[in-house]
Image (tube, helix red, strand yellow):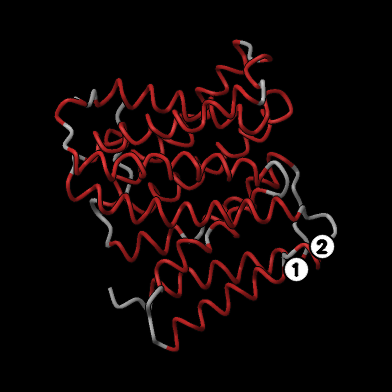
Amino acid sequence: MKIREFNLPPVPAVLLAIISVQCGAAIAKTLFPVIGAAGTASLRIGISALILLLAYRPNFKNITRAQWKIVIPYGVSLGAMNLVFYFAIERIPIGLAVTLEFVGPLLLAIIGSKRLIDYCWVLLAAIGILFIAPWTNDRLDSLGVLFALLAGAFWAGYIVLGGKISKIMNSGYAVSTGMLFAAILVLPFGFLENGFVNLTPKFFGMGIALALLSSAIPFTLEMKALGQLPPRTFSILMSLEPAAASICGFIFLQENLNLYEIFAVICVIIASAGSTLTAKK
C-alpha cells in the first residue's frame, strides 16, 4: 500500500519517519551480538541497495562522467556514515550517538557565517558535547564518541554531495546508484567481521525489517512531507531526532540517560532548531 493512501498530513509524516529510523537503529543494535556492527550495516545497506535498484532500475550506460564523479563519492559517504554510526551505537547509547552526529549538519548549516547568533548556536552545541564527553562520564566509550562525531562529518559530506547530485541526476537513479556504491564499501567490512557466519533466516528477516524501517519507509514519508512543508519547518522537525533516539533507546534497549546527558540532548536540539529558525536561507 502506498503512503499517499493513508493521506497523512506532512507533520505526522515527518514524525513517523523519525520514529521509524530510530526504531530501525534499535533493531540494528539487537543484531550486534550475533552478526556484529559491520555485519548489521552490511545487511541493511545491501538489502536497501537491492530494493532501490529493483525499484528504480537505473541505466548505468546513460550516466555521464560528470554524474559518476559525484554519485560515487555520494554513495561512499552514505555507506561510511551508516557504518561508522553503527560502530558508535555499539559502544554508546543511541540517543547520545545521534546527538553527537547532529553536530556535523549543524556546523555545515552555519559554516562561513559571521553573525553572532550563529556562533551562539555553535557554543550551545559545544556545551552539550562537553556535558557528554567521556571525561565527565566513566560509562561512555571514548572511541564510541569519536565514531559518532565522525559519522556527523560523513553526514555533512553526504548532504553537500546529495545537493550537488540532485541538480544533475534523477533523484531515484541517484539514490539507488549511490546505495550500490555504499554497499560496495560496507560489505567487505561485514565479511571481515565474519558477521554472516551466524546469519539465519530469522536474522535475515530482521535485516529486511531494518532496511525498511531505516530506509524505504522514512524516505517515502519524508518525500511526501517535503512536497508540502517549507524546508525550514522540515529541518526544525528533524531536530527532534536526538530526542526520538533517546526515547527509542530507553524503550527498546533500556538505555537510561543521566541528567548531564539529557541536558546535552536538549542543548543540541535547541541549537539545531535555532540555527534553522535564524538562518538567512
Residue at 68% x, 39% y is 252
In the picture, the quarter occupied by the N terminus is top left
Where is 183 relative to 257, above or below? Answer: above
Residue at 56% x, 32% y is 41
Residue 140 horizontal/vertical position (percent):
78, 55
The answer to which of 25 and 156 lies nearer the viewer is: 156
Q: At label 2, which amino acid type do we have?
A: Asn
CA distance for labels 1 and 2 = 9 Å
Residue 114 horizontal/vertical position (percent):
39, 86
Say whether disc 1 or disc 2 marks the residue closer to the N-terminus.
2
The answer to whether residue 243 is visible is: no
Q: Secondary structure at mark 1?
A: helix
Residue at the top extreme, as displayed? 201
Residue 186 horizontal/vertical position (percent):
51, 32
Q: Residues within 10 Å of mark 2 (few under 14, many from 20)?
A: some
Numbered label tally:
2
Left or right for 10, reference 27: left
Q: Which residue is mark 1?
A: 260
Residue 185 horizontal/vertical position (percent):
47, 33
Which label is found at residue 137? 2
Where is 228 relative to 277, above or below? Answer: above
Q: Is disc 1 in contact with disc 2, using a CB cutoff of under 8 Å?
A: yes
Which quadrant holds residue 259? bottom right
Left or right for 101, reference 37: left
Residue at 30% x, 61% y is 231
The answer to whether residue 123 is visible is: yes
The answer to which of 73 and 210 lies nearer the viewer is: 73
Where is 91 relative to 131, above or below? Answer: above
